[in-house]
Image: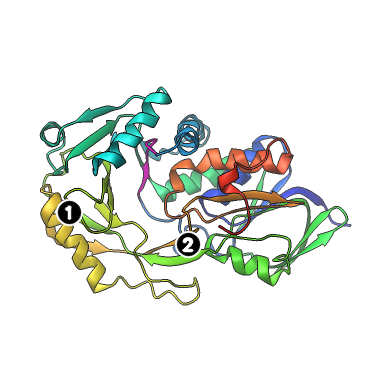
Amino acid sequence: MSEIFDAIVIGGGLVGSSAAWRLAARGRSVVQLEQFGPGHKHGASHGTSRIYRQAYDNHLYTGLAADALPLWRELETTTDIGFLELTGAVDHGLPQAVQSKAKILLEAGIKGEILTPAEASARWPGLRFDTTVLHHPDAGRLHADRAVTALKAGAVFAGAEVRHDVRVLALARASYGVDVVTDSGTLAARQVVIAAGAWTADLIADSGLGSEIVLPTLRTTQEQPAHFAPLDPGVEWPSFVHHTGAELETAGIYGLGSEDGIKIGEHATGPVVTPQTRDYTPGVDGEQRLVEYAESWLPGVDSTRVESLTCLYTSTPDSNFVIDRVGAVTVAAGFSGHGFKFGPALGELVADLVDGTTIAPEVFRLGER
C-alpha cells in the first residue's frame, strides 16, 4: 500500500494553505493539492490587497481576527516574507452599525475610538466621512499574493508537501479514512480537508458525499473592485468600511490603500457565475458606480484614473462561514467575501477539527441555513 498521509488538503488558496501550515506545524504528514499553478487568478485569494480588521458585530469574528494577528506575524518571521501592514481601519456611516462594532471591541479589550467626521477627515484627508466614525489601530492591509505564498512556504518549512497542477476528481471512503482520486493518481489519507472555494459543492456532489455532507446553499458571484490613482502618494490611507443607511443609500463600500492604488469595492453585488463560466470582464455599470462613489467620498483620488478587476465570492445565505467535520472529511467553504483576514486562525480551527479536539462553532456548522 502507498503511504497514508495524516491529512490531505484540497485547495491552494488562503484557507487551504492556512490549514496545511497549521496541520504541518503540529507534526502531521500533510499533502496540499491545488488544481492550478502557483499565483493563479481563478479563485478568491489572489491580488495585492485585503483588509485586516478586528471590528465585527460579534465576539466570534472579532476573536478570530485577533487570534490571527500573532499568527500572521509568526508567519512573516518564519518565512521572511512581509505582507501585513497595520495602517489602522475605520468604519463609518450608519451609527447603529458603527456603535455595535465599537461595543464589541470594548468588551474584547481591543483599542478603538469614536471620532466625528471632521476629526476623521483631519486625520485622513483622502476620505470624506459619514455621520459616525470608529477607528481601531490594530488593523490594516494584507498583500494577498504574498500572504498565500508565505502560507505555502510555512507549510513546506513545517514538513508539508505542496503539489500544484493536480486536479482532484473524486473522494472515496476507505477503511483508514479517504482515498483522494486525482488526475495523476490516487492518494490515501486518514483525514481530508476540502477547502476548494467555488469548486467545493461540485467536488462533494461528484464524489457522492452529498447525502453525508449537507452544505448550505453556496452562491458564487463575480465581484469587481477597482483601483484609483491617489492624488498624493504620500497621504496615509486606513482600511475603511462605509456602512449603508446614513448618507450612503446604495451598497456598502470597502476600501484600502495598495501598491496598485486606492482599492474600493461593493460587497457581494456581482452577477452569479460558476468558476467555469465567469468571463473575468468587469461590467460598465459596476465601474461607473465606483467612479461616482469616488467622486463623492474620496477627495484624495483621481476618479478619472480607474482600473477595474474581478474576483470570486462564494457566499452562504447568512454570510457565516462553513467550517465543520463529518467523519474523516472537514469542509471549509463559503467565506462570503470577508474571510481573508482570519487566515491562520481558520487554519487552527480546521486543524483542531481534524485532530478531534474541538467542535465547530454553531454558526459554522454544515446543514441548511
In the image, is residue 55 part of the stretch drawn in magenta? yes
Q: Earlier in the sequence, mark 2 or mark 1?
A: 2
Q: Residue at x 73, y 61 (%)?
A: 212
Q: Nearer the viewer, residue 104 or 222?
A: 104
Q: Hey, what amino acid is under mark 2?
A: Gly
Q: Quadrant of residue 88?
A: top left
Q: Are marks 2 and 1 in contact (CB under 8 Å)?
A: no
How is the model colour-coded? rainbow
Q: Quadrant of the N terminus?
A: bottom right
Please state the extent of the stretch shown in magenta in the rendering: 49-56
Mark 2 surroundings within 10 Å by alpha-carbon count, few (fewer than 14), some (14 through 19), many (20 or more): many
Q: Could you say which quadrant of the image residue 158 lies in?
A: top right
Q: Which residue is mark 1?
A: 229
Query: Who is closer to the viewer here, 68 or 307?
Result: 68
For the point 60% across and 38% down, the residue is 348
Main SS, magenta region, reads: loop
* Residue denoted by label 2: 43
Query: Quick check: 229 left or right of 348?
Result: left
Q: Which mark is residue 123?
A: none
Residue 69 place in picture, x, y as percent: 45, 32
Badge 1 marks a residue whose secondary structure is strand
**Image location (x, y in percent) of residue 227:** 24, 56
Q: Residue at x 30, y 70 (%)?
A: 282
Q: Amino acid at mark 1?
A: Ala
Question: Along the line of sight, which residue is nearer the eye, 106 or 147?
Answer: 106
Of tags 2 and 1, the one toward the viewer is 2
Decide whether residue 41 is among the magenta residues.
no
